[in-house]
Image (cartoon, rainbow, N blue to C red):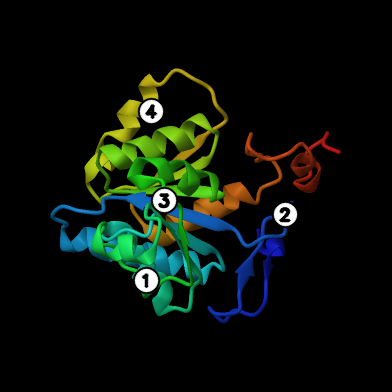
Amino acid sequence: MNSQIEGSSSDATRIARDPFSGAQIRFGVMGSAGGDFAASSLELCRELGRAIAENGCCLLTGACPGLPHEAVLGAKEVGGHVIGISPAMSLKEHVETFGSPYKEYDVLIFTGLGLMGRELVNIRSCNIVIVVGGRSGTLGEFSIAYEEGKLIGVLTGTGGITTALPALENTLGKKTGAEVIYDADPQRLIGLLLERYLSGSYVCPCDPECAQAARGIEGGC
């Protein structure tokens, strides 16, 4: 894993790169944008954001409030790079219609696709998906990630659908290439996900065949 981390140990300069594309590894954090949150869930999500940034990775969210935004705040505390995928067509709509934050993002992309439409962009734009809390919208994002064979982390202890996902996953009965890792500790969860992602045996079905060679697996181009 360490061979794919470049730069010094300083939070702002450490970058974890995909072994095939060379791009910074992107973690998508998907979860509850509204509702009542336990203080412990908020702190877990903030620690998750810090862990993503401290490991040299980029954080991507749906540019929404709630639990994902706590991860954004955590990432920014340690100089992390954050991308927001907005459902809005403009900053005006983002703020006035969706009531969403904007100041903490390094890059804010306006899809104009609405809340459900931008879910596909969220999932397809990240290498690893993490579920925190969550309601029906997050369940939809989990379903897309699972169907498309993504590496998925579930931060347990954050409530919402995270309590139901282990049982739900057991009923799916479909092999898509997706792998799901559960953990209640944000730092450990990020470590486990990165270890798996950077291992020589992991390839997402969404990657081209050339990625197999880049990851040390026989085949590819």
3 or 1: mark nearer the eye: 3
Residues marked 4 and 1 touching at CB (< 8 Å): no
In terms of secondary structure, where does tag 3 sit? loop
The residue labelled by disc 2 is 21
What residue type is disc 1 on?
A: Gly
What residue type is disc 4 on?
A: Glu
The residue labelled by disc 3 is 112
The residue labelled by disc 4 is 169
Q: Position of residue 185 (x, y in %)?
A: 36, 57
Q: Position of residue 70 (x, y in %)?
A: 30, 65
Q: Quadrant location of the C terminus? A: top right
Distance from disc 3 to disc 1, alpha carbons, whole Å, reads: 27 Å
Give the camera-side residue of 98 and 13.
98
Q: Is residue 18 left or right of residue 52?
A: right
Distance from disc 3 to disc 4, alpha carbons, whole Å, reads: 31 Å
Q: Is residue 1 left or right of residue 119?
A: right
What residue type is disc 3 on?
A: Gly
Residues marked 3 and 2 touching at CB (< 8 Å): no
Q: Residue furthest left?
A: 36
Q: Quadrant location of the N terminus? A: bottom right
The residue labelled by disc 1 is 74
Q: Residue furthest right?
A: 221
Give the camera-side residue of 12 and 201.
12
- Name which residue lies at 77% across and 36% down: 209
4 or 1: mark nearer the eye: 1
Residues marked 3 and 4 touching at CB (< 8 Å): no
In terms of secondary structure, where does tag 2 sit? loop
